[in-house]
Amino acid sequence: MAAVLASVVRQVRVVRLGLAEYAPTLDAMRAFTARRRADTTDELWLLQHPPVYTLGLGADTAHGPKADVGIPVVRVERGGQVTYHGPGQLVLYTLIDIARRSIKVREFVSLLEQSVIDMLAEHGVCASRVPGAPGVYVQGAKVAALGIRVSRGRTFHGLALNVDLDLAPFAAIDPCGYPGLAVTRMRDLGIDQSCEQAGNRLAEILLARLERA
């Protein structure tokens, strides 16, 4: 039995969902997490969402959206404040049993951030963390937002990487609760990739880091 569990720990299934509506995807994440067993294989979901604003569990509505721009607003159980999802943004949902892998929450957040930093570095872009503000930044502008939820040692939600999306909807919010925070995207950093290409590479990097963790 121990050998079987050890094998499961190393396995991660990558699921590519394309453009997926937010609400049913959220329901699917919750259901997957609720029915997990000790031997359930971890999964990474790669996708994009139609336009939607999401607010974390403790998000302050003062951070927006500050005007009705015709985009749905959904409050969810992840950490963090308000953010925007839309086509051209890579969303990576991490359905990982971190307890089984003996990874602490803060260590897992750092692992996700470092995976994005490493991927951008492959294209000559120097990205970094900002203490106390989870995510990935390039010269002070946020390129990737991060918010996870942990239930019984299993994570869901994940990160959103701006690849080639329209950044205009960010003007109606204080991104991640920071007034005036600049946002950027991979295209503006000189990286010409599709969400599919970026997602495949980011998953490879993350899987390698999980293997070493």
Image (cartoon, rainbow, N blue to C red):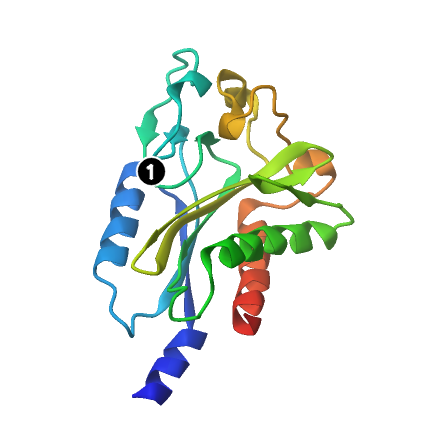
Above or below, comparing residue 166 to residue 127 in the picture: above
Q: Position of residue 147 (x, y in %)?
A: 45, 43
Above or below, comparing residue 47 to residue 23 in the picture: below
**Furthest residue toward right:** 124
Q: Position of residue 157 (x, y in %)?
A: 39, 47
**Which structural element holds mark 1?**
helix
Q: Residue at x 55, y 25 (%)?
A: 178
In this view of the protein, which residue sits in the foreground, 88 or 137?
A: 137
Q: Position of residue 193 (x, y in %)?
A: 64, 46
Q: Position of residue 146 (x, y in %)?
A: 50, 43
At label 1, the amino acid type is Tyr
Q: Say whether residue 114 is left or right of residue 6.
A: right
Number of marks in the image? 1
Above or below, comparing residue 32 to residue 192 in the picture: below
Residue 64 position by quadrant: top left
Above or below, comparing residue 88 to residue 12 in the picture: above
Q: Residue at x 39, y 28 (%)?
A: 59
**Furthest residue toward top:** 67
Q: Residue at x 34, y 81 (%)?
A: 5
Residue 60 position by quadrant: top left
Q: Residue at x 56, y 57 (%)?
A: 111
Q: Which residue is mark 1?
A: 22
Q: Quadrant of the N terminus?
A: bottom left
Q: Quadrant of the C terminus?
A: bottom right
